[in-house]
Amino acid sequence: MARSALPLAVLALLALLGLGAAAEPPKVEVYARSHAEEGKENILHCFVTGFHPPKIDIKLLKNGEPIPGVKYGDLSFNEKWQFQRLVYVPFTPTRGDTFSCEVAHSTMPKPRIYLWGMLTRLLSCVWGNSRSGTFFLQVKVFLSFCPLFIIATKTINVLSDIR
């Protein structure tokens, strides 16, 4: 009797662990393969991770319309045994066009759209990088990179020793 209860207990534990993972919506990153330049062909990526169950709908969009020729990477697991998938397509960034990734999953009440472009350029203007344990928060807003924002330049160095 005890031997037959062990597999049932393991299945129940796995089911409970799966319920906790199912409550969280997937994490989505939309990015270009290389530094994006207007008029130069690139690859648009939408990387979706941390979702369960595996059924998910991922679309790459240009100005709200599906982009033809999208390729789908294999559905795989991450280190937490949650699913992940890479979706990508060749694209040419052009002024005035909006590129995005639409994701629909059972953990979301409705599909969500994740933008590439203006938000990405804004974040690259605002956040600096990490060099030898010191973080530099650089608030630099330039007209050429962030045209919808006020021109301002301010650098705030936030020193932090992470050793």
Image (tube, grey):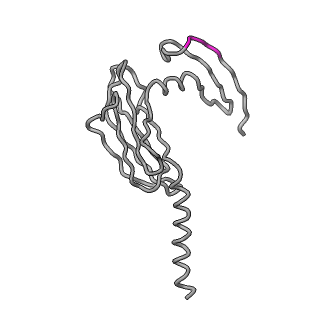
| Residue at (45, 53) in percent of width and height | 83
Q: What main secondary structure does the magenta stretch of the protein show?
A: strand
Judged from this view, the residue extending furthest toward the left is: 68
Q: Is residue 149 magenta?
A: no
Q: Is residue 71 above or below residue 75?
A: above
| Residue at (40, 45) in percent of width and height | 104
Residue 29 in percent (x, y) is at 47, 38
Report how many numbered discs are placed on residues in the image. 0
Q: Is residue 5 above or below residue 39?
A: below
Give the extent of the magenta segment: 150-154
Q: Is residue 152 magenta?
A: yes
Judged from this view, the residue extending furthest toward the bottom is: 1
Residue 11 in percent (x, y) is at 51, 72
- The N terminus, quarter of image: bottom right
**Left or right: 19 in relation to 60:** right
| Residue at (33, 29) in percent of width and height | 62
**Left or right: 158 in relation to 14:** right
The answer to which of 71 and 16 lies nearer the viewer is: 16
The answer to which of 3 and 107 lies nearer the viewer is: 107
The answer to which of 84 and 1 lies nearer the viewer is: 1
- The C terminus, quarter of image: top right
Residue 139 in percent (x, y) is at 61, 20
Residue 12 in percent (x, y) is at 54, 71
| Residue at (52, 78) in percent of width and height | 7
